[in-house]
């Protein structure tokens, strides 16, 4: 049986692709809400997802997605909300970081000790 997270990923991907057809080339979208409802189990079926842009404003876009199996039976329905943002043209300027480079501490080293003893349960 197909795990639900894969269906949620399919919903997110279909929603993003539907939204991409309406975005200007200098904008990106960041998912801020994903809701997926599951109606039937999926056992190795071929799946199809169709996303429809329900509403797109200046800052937010709402997309509805239907996922059907090869027989056309609805197996899941999703709703996504995306925050629309201008695309960054260049890498961030890290020269203005809070701490100068010579004062940034080294990252902590992982503790690779061994565990001895029981769990005390």
Image (cartoon, helix red, strand yellow):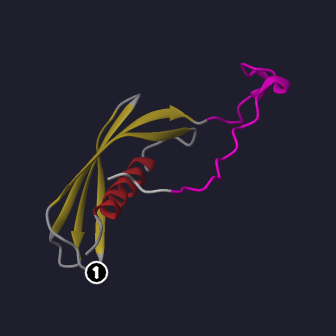
For the residue labelled by badge 1, is the local secondary structure a helix, a strand or a loop?
Answer: loop
Position in image of residue 103 (x %, y %):
81, 23
- For image coordinates 28% across by 62% down, the residue present is 4
Identify the residue position indicated by label 1 in the image. 44
- The main secondary structure of the magenta stretch is loop
Query: Where on the picture, by quarter, is residue 44?
Result: bottom left
Position in image of residue 22 (x %, y %):
42, 45
Residue 25 higher or lower than 88, as above or below? below
Look at the image and say whether residue 94 sits in the magenta stretch: yes
Position in image of residue 80 (x %, y %):
31, 45
- For image coordinates 18% across by 71% down, the residue present is 41
Residue 91 higher or lower than 53, as above or below? above
Residue at the far right: name it. Answer: 102
In the rendered structure, which segment of residues is drawn in magenta? Answer: 88-116
Look at the image and say whether residue 115 sits in the magenta stretch: yes
Position in image of residue 71 (x %, y %):
18, 78
Q: Nearer the viewer, residue 41 or 28?
A: 41
Residue 54 higher or lower than 112, as above or below? above
């Amino acid at each position: 049986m197909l795990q639900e997270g894969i269906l949620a990923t399919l919903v997110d991907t279909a929603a993003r692709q539907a939204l991409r057809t309406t975005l200007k080339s200098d904008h990106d979208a960041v998912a801020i809400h994903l809701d997926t409802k599951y109606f039937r189990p999926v056992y190795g079926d071929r799946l199809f997802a169709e996303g429809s842009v329900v509403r797109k404003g200046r800052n937010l876009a709402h997309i509805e997605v239907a996922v059907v199996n090869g027989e056309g039976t609805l197996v899941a329905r999703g709703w996504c909300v995306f925050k629309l943002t201008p695309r960054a043209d260049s890498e961030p300027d890290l020269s203005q970081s809070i701490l100068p480079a010579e004062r940034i501490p080294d990252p902590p080293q992982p503790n690779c000790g061994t565990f001895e003893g029981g769990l005390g349960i």
